[in-house]
Amino acid sequence: MIAVEDCGKIISGLDFLFNIALLIISFLIIFIDIKKLVIPDTLSLLFITMIIIKKGFHYYTIERSILGMGVYILPFIFIYGYISELLKRELVGFGDIKLLLGIGYWMEYQSFYELYFYYFVTFLVAAAYIMISFAIYRKVKREIPFAPFLLISFIYFYFKGNL
């Protein structure tokens, strides 16, 4: 017979393995996006599925999670659909939008402040990368993968809430 304390250790161990798997998938997405400027559908779907499994379908959080999926992608849908059309070049890839579905599900829609803060951290990391890249190479690549910045911010908020 398994004692209640042992169940807690088993769940804790599974949670640890799940976190490691999520990190591996995140780093695979980052690596592939940097190398090829594309996020494979299989990895983004696996990322979204793992986030949904981890977060669950609790009646209290499901509504906010689904709202988060919609709200977190809105700025990128606007950029993808309208701004890219005006400038006649793609500013954000649809893979980034699909990746944000999973991030939005995890982050939930709590308030505009939390949404704003997530994007602030994301763009701050991106700006730091661009400044460092410019300082070292005296130029910035024309196309910069955005998934690494989205995932670095996500990993920060994910483990900030889990520690």
Image: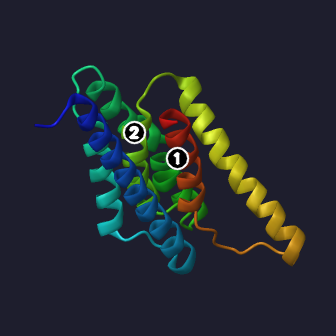
Please count the marks in the image. 2
Q: Secondary structure at mark 1?
A: helix
Q: Residues within 10 Å of mark 2 (few under 14, many from 20)?
A: many
Image height of 12 relative to 58, above or below: below
Q: Position of residue 67 (x, y in %)?
A: 35, 30
Q: Position of residue 22 (x, y in %)?
A: 40, 56
Q: Residues within 10 Å of mark 1 (few under 14, many from 20)?
A: many
Please state which of residues 127 and 161 is positioned toward the viewer in this rendering.
Answer: 161
The N terminus appears in which quarter of the rendering?
top left
The structure residue drawn at horizontal position 15% and vertical position 37%, both measured from the top left corner, is 2
Please state which of residues 49 and 79 is positioned toward the viewer in this rendering.
Answer: 49
Please state which of residues 37 and 4 is positioned toward the viewer in this rendering.
Answer: 4
Instruction: Work out how far the residue at label 1 is from the one at label 2, CA to CA, in angstroms.
Output: 9 Å
The structure residue drawn at horizontal position 53% and vertical position 48%, both measured from the top left corner, is 155
The structure residue drawn at horizontal position 37% and vertical position 71%, both measured from the top left corner, is 40
Instruction: Specify how the rendered protein is coloured.
Output: rainbow
Q: Is residue 136 left or right of residue 17?
A: right
The reply to whether callout 1 and callout 2 are in contact (CB within 8 Å) is: yes
Image height of 118 relative to 42, above or below: above
Task: Check disc 1 and report the residue beneath it.
Answer: 154
Q: Position of residue 59 (x, y in %)?
A: 21, 22
Q: Name the quadrant containing residue 20.
A: bottom left
Q: Which mark, by number, is residue 98?
A: none
Q: Is residue 105 left or right of residue 123?
A: left
Task: Check disc 2 and report the residue beneath it.
Answer: 106
- Sequence-wise, the earlier of marks 1 and 2 is 2
Amino acid residing under circle 1 = Phe
Q: Secondary structure at mark 2?
A: helix
Q: Position of residue 146 (x, y in %)?
A: 57, 61
Amino acid residing under circle 2 = Trp
